[in-house]
Image (cartoon, grey):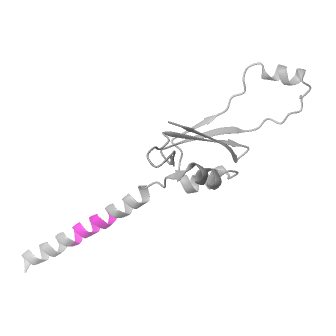
Amino acid sequence: MMKSLRIFFSLVLISLSAISHAKSNVASEKIIYSEQEFIQAFDGRSRSEVQKILGKPNKKETAVRPMGADQYTEKAGNTSLKKDAIEMWYYSKIVRFNSKKIYKTIELTFANDKCINFSFAF
């Protein structure tokens, strides 16, 4: 009786372990997009919408205005230009180039919380 009880609990533990492992694999699988699918899916989306779908980016960077840029915009007469909030997000290996190649890095550029540009690199 004791031996069969041990075997039963062992089987239950193994089953639970297998189920939790299968769920973690499904959650960690990434969707691989074609270039057009990716652009259509994320063009004009907000950062929060992108993060809901793609998850947290691998890296974030904020654009920095070049030194002396204000002098040139003042000379051109554009003194009242609104400064945009520009941020770049980077993801890895989620867009395919063709049936055999996947881009190593994808950059999404956000201006004032809207995705406005994409860059793909090998």
Position of the N terminus by quadrant? bottom left
Look at the picture and state if 59 lies above or below 45: above
Q: Residue lying farthest bottom? A: 1
Q: Residue 55: percent from the left, percent from the top?
A: 53, 52
Look at the picture and state if 117 lies above or below 19: above
Q: Residue at x 49, y 47 (%)?
A: 98
Of the pair 56 and 38, the residue shown nearer to us:
38
Q: How many marks can you see?
A: 0
Indicate the quadrant where residue 90 lies.
Answer: top right
Left or right: 52, with 86 as reference point: left
Of the pair 101 and 20, the residue shown nearer to us:
101
Of the pair 20 and 78, the residue shown nearer to us:
78
Of the pair 13 and 82, the residue shown nearer to us:
82
Q: Residue 62: percent from the left, percent from the top?
A: 64, 34
Q: Residue at x 25, y 69 (%)?
A: 15
- Residue 73 falls within the magenta-colored stretch: no
- Residue 13 falls within the magenta-colored stretch: yes
Q: Residue at x 63, y 50 (%)?
A: 39
Left or right: 100, with 47 as reference point: left
Q: Residue 122: percent from the left, percent from the top?
A: 50, 36
Q: Which residues are magenta?
A: 12-20
| Magenta residues, dominant SS class | helix
Left or right: 60, with 44 as reference point: left
Left or right: 11, with 83 as reference point: left
Q: Residue at x 89, y 20 (%)?
A: 75
Indicate the quadrant where residue 120 lies.
Answer: top right
Q: Residue lying farthest right? A: 77
